[in-house]
Amino acid sequence: MKAFRSPRVVLTLALVGATALVGLRAARLPGTYFEVTKHLEILTSVFKGVHEFYVEEPEPGTLMSVAIDAMLDELDPYTVYYPESRIEDLRFMNTGEYGGIGALVQPIGGKTTIVEVYEGYPAQKAGIRPGDVVLSVGGQSLEGDANSDDVGELLKGESGSEIEVRIERPHGGGILDLMVERAKVRVPAVTYSGMLDDSTGYIYLAKFTRGSAGEVRKALLSLRDSAGMKQLVFDLRGNGGGLLKESVSIVNLFVPKGTEIVSTRGKSENWNKSYKALGRPTALDLPLVVLIDGKSASASEIVSGTLQDLDRAVIVGMESFGKGLVQQTKDMAFNTRLKVTVAKYYTASGRCIQRLDYGGARDSQGKACAVSDTLLRTFETTGGRPVIEGRGIQPDIEVETPFMSTLLQRLLDEYEVFHYATEVAAGLDSTDVPDPVSYDMADADWARFLDHLQDASFEYDTESMVVLEELRNVVELEQYQEVAQEQLASLRLALEPNLERDLGLFEEEIRQTLEDEVVLRFHYAAGMVERSLTKDPAVGRALMVFGDEMSDVFGTGVGEEAAPTRE
């Protein structure tokens, strides 16, 4: 008869066996390898000791997850461990594909709420809308604080399978029971492409997932051959990057075959590589402006940085994020994965744009510091223009990001913009569908927004009041209360949040954000982008670049070698 062994005994035997194996290997391995195996043995013995002697019964998976996360925190934020339960997230990041209904859920006020619906997918076809509250999925109740990841897993599934979704539609819509057939959902990398005027095309690339270069090429050909595009604004703002291969292929669309695009260097010789343009370009001579901002990172910086280095495009916007690191995914034990930083990348001029030195000194809070300005090197573009390393991609023409008031930020954080847009959209029937570009919120709807906020008991604070409170504390510390009391009281009266007053002060930006959110309800992500183009200062500035100003940036003409003039 086979002897029964408790989970604790099995775990102990496994750990002892692993310890013995590690010990044998450690005895044979010199230098660094000895250090690795020695500390593995220490970790194993501590893990075993905790399970054998700790007063409570600890959970092995939780302990090890905490240990792994703490270990990786000492490296960089891009080296990440994925347990088996999160493998689907990793696949989605690389491919943009998953099996599901095509909707994004978020817990808001203790309710699982649909915050976005993808056009053309099952959720939209079934009539699900942003603002709908999900009550149950497949008969499983979601009442209370349901975790959005758990809900997402319930909604995901094999393409062709059906799931029953019960929703509550706010503002009189009642409760609806919907049968939704899951499908293979692929969130497009090119969110929008179109014409800004008779000759200027526009492409917005949201991410670098598998196939994104093909999407950009398809959009380029369509705009050039069907819409008469003669120049292009390529928007990479907010694009946090993705696959290195796709960034190389996208640069290849604009530069000659054989051009070196990017190189990588790592600890392993396998990562000392040079990536060149392998195909024929699609738009070799097309005048090009690339838009970037502080959220453009990684693959976005390879594209914008290399096009800048080659004097192939004018870069407009704000300084980019500064991520010059390359990750690769490795299979680990028990169907887990490790996304690990394996190399740094260098754009065509030879610069690495990595801003933070994760292997260097840390600040008082343990965060990585930027490399000192005095240690940074300057490189040159093909035409001799200076470009600096270690600071992301610096635009040729800087356009400030539009101001956002603290009030609007609080309204977004508390989902009040989202809730009121849902209410306004509910009052529009099929004959009132707003045009994505020309829609203006009715004055009556705007006037009711104050009532909506008061009914919701919305309260907010400002940075000005935080600083004023700090000043008051310093004044008391230095005993200037009697001297400054009247002035402080007057300043407090002026700066204290006043909802009605502040809605008037910041009406334009708040009203515009509400209108954008209403448009999203009817025209989805593409409609939002189309609407934003008419009011976007960076796009407006990009349109001014083509022609004489493009020559000014490069010194003479696009691609010609000459000393540049920069703003």
Image (cartoon, helix red, strand yellow):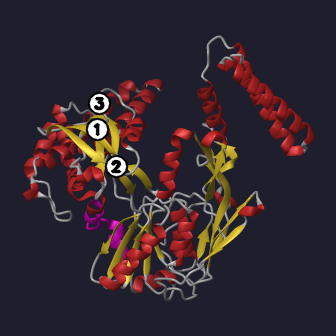
Badge 3 amino acid: Ala
Packing grade of label 1 (10 A; few <14, some 14-19, many >=20) is some
Closer mark to the observer between disc 1 and disc 2: 2
The earlier-in-sequence mark between 3 and 2 is 2
Residue drawn at the location 41% of the way across and 35% of the way down: 150
Secondary element type, mark 2: loop
Packing grade of label 2 (10 A; few <14, some 14-19, many >=20) is many
Q: Can residue 290 be seen in this view?
A: no
The earlier-in-sequence mark between 1 and 2 is 2
Q: Badge 2 is on which residue?
A: 182
Report how many numbered discs are placed on residues in the image.
Answer: 3
For residue 224, above or below residue 401: below
Separation (CA) of disc 3 from disc 1: 10 Å
Which quarter of the figure has residue 133?
top left
Which quarter of the figure has residue 219?
bottom left
The earlier-in-sequence mark between 3 and 1 is 3
Badge 1 amino acid: Leu
Q: Badge 3 is on which residue?
A: 489
Residue drawn at the location 68% of the way across and 14% of the way down: 54
Badge 2 amino acid: Arg
Residue 495 circle label:
1
Separation (CA) of disc 3 from disc 2: 60 Å
The magenta segment: 528-542
Closer mark to the observer between disc 3 and disc 2: 2
Magenta highlight: main SS? helix
